[in-house]
Image (cartoon, grey):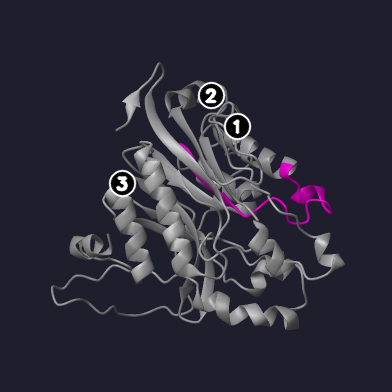
């Protein structure tokens, strides 16, 4: 349970740094559950996973022309996770068993489309939220669909106000401001490995990517749990087929970090090619100290000069005029399941 420190509430948090089990959803879920169990034994109350760690990030889209990448299309689609599935229930059961909040990056399949998503499970195994990346980056748009304004939210929990964004969403000024305006206290940033194009482009380098998370913490006066994948040897061997490919990627790329609202780092960082958890006790009282200096969506704002318009309405391809209901008259919740199903999944 959360305690109290010199300034305020203490929360034990963890950022995952691990390689996905690429293209194998069931094995990836078991690996994720192992990390959740490890965090639970350490007393962690909130654990954050990398971007699309289930079933892994589709790095090949940065390597080859579409014709060559088609060999991965069907396996990746088939191994994407579905809300309410057996794999979903297993993750929820693990959160419940460990009495822990879990924010996990997934490739979500709905119908015939995939979305870069972050699912937030609560300590009772409940689904707190499922969000989708607002705008997949560059060639990601050849695989994934888009989210909408309803995906930009912050959840109020007993630990604090928890929000989440994927990868370069964390450097989009308006997206960040939308999160800051909701009094975000703990931010879950999900990233793939920082070893793609690292030698070719400064923008993709570990230095810049790590700094994006630190700046987010300082700008928003919040704690940032930045979770990053690792490219291990099996993934490297799958991707690298010629000398040109060798220039695109390298083994490693894990730079998971925890930053505070003053930019300070918390926890012990891992080697860039190591897997594990970065764990820290964070004092949420430090936020109020930072807010006294600058609150960008509060007293440090100038709404007479600059303001953000945030359309929070869902924008889906089909707008229904009615809604089917369950026998009890209640609308069934997407991906919901009774406690008995979670117990069976354990």
Give the x, y percent position of residue 23.
56, 70
Q: Mark 2 falls on what kind of element? A: helix
* Residue 103 in view here: yes
Badge number at residue 98: 3
Crowding at dot 3, Cα within 10 Å, few <14 / some 14-19 / many 20+, comes out as many
Q: Nearer the viewer, residue 52 or 218?
A: 52
Q: Is residue 3 above or below residue 123?
A: above
Q: Using the rendered view, name the quadrant where residue 130 is placed.
A: bottom left
Residue under numbered circle 2:
290
Range of magenta residues: 184-206
Q: Secondary structure at mark 1?
A: helix
Q: Residue furthest top?
A: 6
Residue closest to the eye, 121 or 299: 121
Q: Is residue 301 visible?
A: no
Which sits earlier in the primary sequence, circle 3 or circle 2?
A: 3
Is the residue 302 above or below the residue 338 in the image? above
CA gap, disc 3 and disc 1: 31 Å
Residue 295 position in % (x across, y down)? 54, 30
Q: CA distance from mark 1 to mark 2?
A: 8 Å
Q: Residues within 10 Å of mark 1 (few under 14, many from 20)?
A: many
Which of these two is toward me, 307 or 126? 126
Task: Give me the residue at 68% from left, 49% from top.
Answer: 253
Tell me the distance, in whole angstroms, between the alpha carbons under discs 3 and 2. 32 Å
Q: Which element carries disc 3, helix, strand or loop?
A: helix
Q: Disc 1, disc 2: CB below 8 Å?
A: yes
User: Residue 83, how many percent across, how many down?
Assistant: 38, 69
Q: Is residue 171 magenta?
A: no
In front: label 3 or label 1? 3
Residue 143, image quadrant: bottom right
């Amino acid at each position: 349970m959360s305690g109290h420190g010199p300034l305020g509430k203490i929360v034990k948090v963890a950022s995952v740094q691990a390689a996905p089990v690429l293209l194998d959803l069931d094995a990836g879920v078991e690996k994720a559950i192992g990390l959740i169990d490890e965090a639970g034994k350490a007393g962690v109350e909130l654990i954050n996973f990398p971007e699309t760690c289930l079933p892994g990030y589709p790095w090949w889209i940065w390597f080859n022309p579409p014709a060559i990448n088609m060999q991965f299309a069907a396996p990746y689609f088939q191994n994407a996770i579905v809300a309410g599935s057996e794999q979903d229930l297993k993750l929820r059961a693990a959160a419940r068993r460990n009495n822990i909040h879990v924010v996990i990056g997934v490739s979500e399949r709905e119908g015939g489309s995939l979305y870069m998503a972050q699912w937030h499970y609560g300590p009772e195994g409940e689904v707190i939220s499922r969000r989708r990346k607002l705008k997949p980056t560059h060639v990601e748009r050849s695989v994934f669909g888009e989210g909408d304004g309803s995906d930009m939210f912050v959840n109020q929990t007993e630990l604090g106000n928890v929000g989440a964004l994927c990868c370069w969403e964390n450097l989009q000024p308006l997206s960040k401001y939308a999160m800051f305006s909701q009094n975000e206290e703990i931010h879950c940033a999900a990233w793939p490995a920082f070893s793609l194009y690292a030698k070719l482009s400064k923008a993709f380098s570990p230095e810049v990517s790590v700094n994006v998370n630190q700046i987010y913490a300082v700008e928003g006066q919040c704690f940032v749990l930045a979770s990053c994948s690792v490219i291990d040897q099996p993934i490297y061997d799958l991707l690298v087929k010629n000398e040109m490919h060798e220039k695109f990627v390298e083994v490693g790329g894990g730079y998971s970090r925890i930053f505070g609202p003053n930019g300070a780092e918390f926890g012990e960082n891992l080697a860039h090619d190591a897997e594990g958890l970065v764990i820290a006790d964070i004092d949420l009282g430090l936020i109020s100290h930072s807010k006294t200096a600058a609150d960008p969506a509060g007293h440090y704002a100038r709404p007479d000069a600059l303001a953000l318009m945030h359309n929070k309405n869902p924008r889906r391809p089909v707008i229904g005029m009615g809604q089917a209901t369950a026998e009890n008259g209640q609308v069934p919740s997407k991906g919901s399941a009774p406690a008995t199903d979670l117990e069976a999944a354990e």
